[in-house]
Image: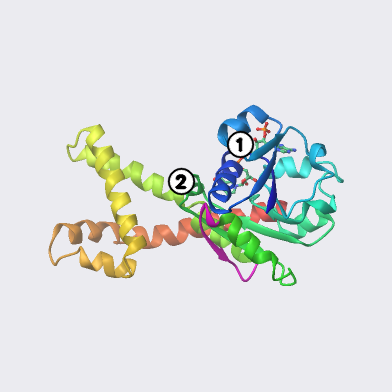
Amino acid sequence: MKILFVGCGNMGAAIAAGALRKIPGLALSVVDPDVARAQALLPDDRVTFHADITAVRDETFDATVLAIKPQMFHALPEDALLAQGFGLVVSIMAGVTLAGLQHKLGHSRIVRTMPNLPALVGAGMTVGYAAPDLAAGDRPVVETLFAGSGQFAWLPEETLVDSATAVAGSGPGYVFAFAEHMIAAAQAVGLEAELADRLVRQTLLGAASLLHSDPRTAAELKQAVTSKKGTTEAGLGVFEGPGGLPDLCRSGVAAARDRAQELSKAG
Ligand SMILES: NC(=O)c1ccc[n+]([C@@H]2O[C@H](COP(=O)([O-])OP(=O)(O)OC[C@H]3O[C@@H](n4cnc5c(N)ncnc54)[C@H](OP(=O)(O)O)[C@@H]3O)[C@@H](O)[C@H]2O)c1
């Protein structure tokens, strides 16, 4: 398989590295104006680097991943991505709709995806939306492409990209904020800063590992660690009380979804 990445920043490099791990015999070409930085982010001798897209115009690829910022995409010359040889186009650009992509690219062999930051450690969650008429053979290419950076799921409607962005795209940010505030709370009850940081990181990792590997639901796992009149019940009484996590999660996710919708309208 031969894949082209247009843009090799943090996210492009993470997905490309995952693809190299999973796809035997993969030939990867990368276009990024900062070749030295791209090489540092993706140190692999199976990759060919170019500073400009014109360098690959005469080549043929099975798929092309658009991993540049949306504003860079809009600034590309009209004909930059029109080459037939670019194959299936997979966009990871936030807020750029399928219609916007089709308009610029002049065809509809396109998949819109939304990865998230844990792709950097092979534990990402990527969702994808493709027009219903996309050839059946193109879907497995996308699934294979993202298999090395974590899990992948198809969405049945494009509007759900904004909902999934609010949950999985922005989700790591919410978890980092929770960690930050837990570390501050740990210090407030007397734990020294370094130990507070260690306790919170390892507790989140341990709980996330259980969520990943244990077949019980999140609610059942919570029940399992909460004894009557115990410490967890006392803490949860506040976390889940009026204005607590249930309300905060609902309104936080809705606010992120609304913002994603605004950005999609602009793009
Ligand atoms: N980071 C995330 O958590 C995340 C999550 C979901 C989706 N995304 C999406 O992923 C995309 C990339 O994000 P990122 O965080 O990886 O950004 P980034 O680190 O800025 O990477 C973008 C790369 O593309 C290069 N570039 C700019 N114009 C180009 C062109 N015409 N041809 C080829 N390469 C070009 C940039 O080079 P210069 O720096 O020299 O301009 C940069 O190296 C964005 O569209 C974003 O919406 C990111």
Looking at the image, can residue 7 be seen?
yes
Q: Residue at x 33, y 43 (%)?
A: 181
Secondary structure beneath disc 1?
A: loop
Q: Given the current orientation, which residue lies at the most extreme front position?
A: 25
Q: Residue at x 27, y 49 (%)?
A: 203
Q: Can you tell which quarter of the image residue 192 is in?
A: top left
* Residue 45 numbered mark, or none: 1
The residue nearer to you, when weighing 244 against 260, is: 260
Query: For this view, does 131 lie left or right of residue 198?
Result: right
Query: For this view, does 117 lie left or right of residue 248?
Result: right
Q: Earlier in the sequence, mark 2 or mark 1?
A: 1
Query: For this view, does 88 lie left or right of residue 176?
Result: right
Q: Amino acid at mark 1?
A: Asp
Query: Where's ligand 1: which quadrant?
Result: top right
Q: Amino acid at mark 2?
A: Val
Q: Can you tell which quarter of the image residue 113 is in?
A: bottom right
The part of the chain drawn in magenta is 147-158
The residue nearer to you, when weighing 151 against 28, is: 28
Secondary structure beneath disc 2?
A: helix
Horizontal and vertical percent position of residue 125: 50, 56
Looking at the image, can residue 255 be seen?
no
